[in-house]
Amino acid sequence: MVPMSDTWTISVAGRSYGPYTAAQMQAFAAEGRLAPQSLVARGEENQYRAASDDATLAALFRPAQPAPAPAQQPRQFFTADGNQDIQAFGRQEEEPSAGQRTHFVVVADMKSRSISGLEEEIFNLGPAVPIMPQAWLLACDQPINQIRQTLVQKLGKLDMLFIADATHDKAAWFNFGPEADSRIRRIWQKTPDMTALKRTG
C-alpha cells in the first residue's frame, strides 16, 4: 500500500507537475497516465527516476494477483431415496442384469445451454427417441445415477433434468431445488398398500 503522507512530482518534456499525493499517483497509474518509465521525484527531491525504480510506486505496476476462485458448492442431486451430492456417484447401486436394457424417460428444461449437446449425449447412451420437445425415451443398460451423472455435464446453472426409470420404478432429478424436491419425493415414494395390510391383518 502506498503511504498516504508521501508526495511526488512528475517530469514531462522537461516540465515538472505536482506535487501529487499517493491517492493521485494511484489514480494516474490506474488510468494509464503514470507508466513505469514516467519520471518522478519524491517530496522535495530534485533527482528524477523512473516510477518503476521508486520502491513505493513500483507496486502500482505489478500485475494484480487474481482473487482466489470461490469454492464451488457441490451440486445437489435428488432421488426418491434421498439427496446425494456429486461425490456420491460411484457407490454401489442396483445394476441391470447383463444385456438387460432399462427404459428411461428423460425430461429436461434447458435455459442456459443448447439442447443439442444434451440430446447427443442421450443418443450416445443407447437407443433413444424424442417423444416431445426436451423429452426422450431411452433404452440403456446403465443405472439411473450413472445416466444422470453423464447428462448433468451438459447442463448449465439454470437447466433442470428429470429421469424416470420405468423398469425399476426409480427417479432422479437435478436443479429443482428443495421445495420441488420435497413435493416430487412425497409423490414418488412408495406408500404402504393399506388394503393389502387389512387383508393380511
Image (spheres, rainbow, N blue to C red):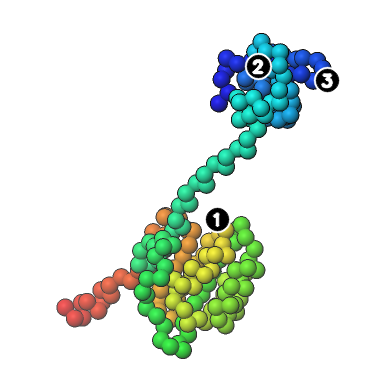
Amino acid under disc 1? Lys
- Image x and y of residue 32, in percent: 73, 30
Q: Residue at x 76, y 18 (%)?
A: 11
Instruction: Find residue 98 and report its horizontal and vertical position in percent.
Output: 43, 88
Q: Hey, what amino acid is under mark 3?
A: Ala
Whole-angstrom CA distance, mark 3 to mark 2, is 18 Å
Q: Which residue is mark 2?
A: 42
Mark 1 to mark 3: distance in Å? 54 Å
Q: Of the residues tagged 1 and 3, which is closer to the observer?
A: 3
Q: Are marks 3 and 2 in contact (CB under 8 Å)?
A: no
- On residue 51, which mark appears? none
Residue placed under numbered mark 3 in the picture: 13
**Which tag, 3 or 2, sits closer to the chain's start?**
3
Q: Is residue 57 above or below residue 113?
A: above
Q: Which residue is mark 1?
A: 157
In the image, 24: left or right of 173? right
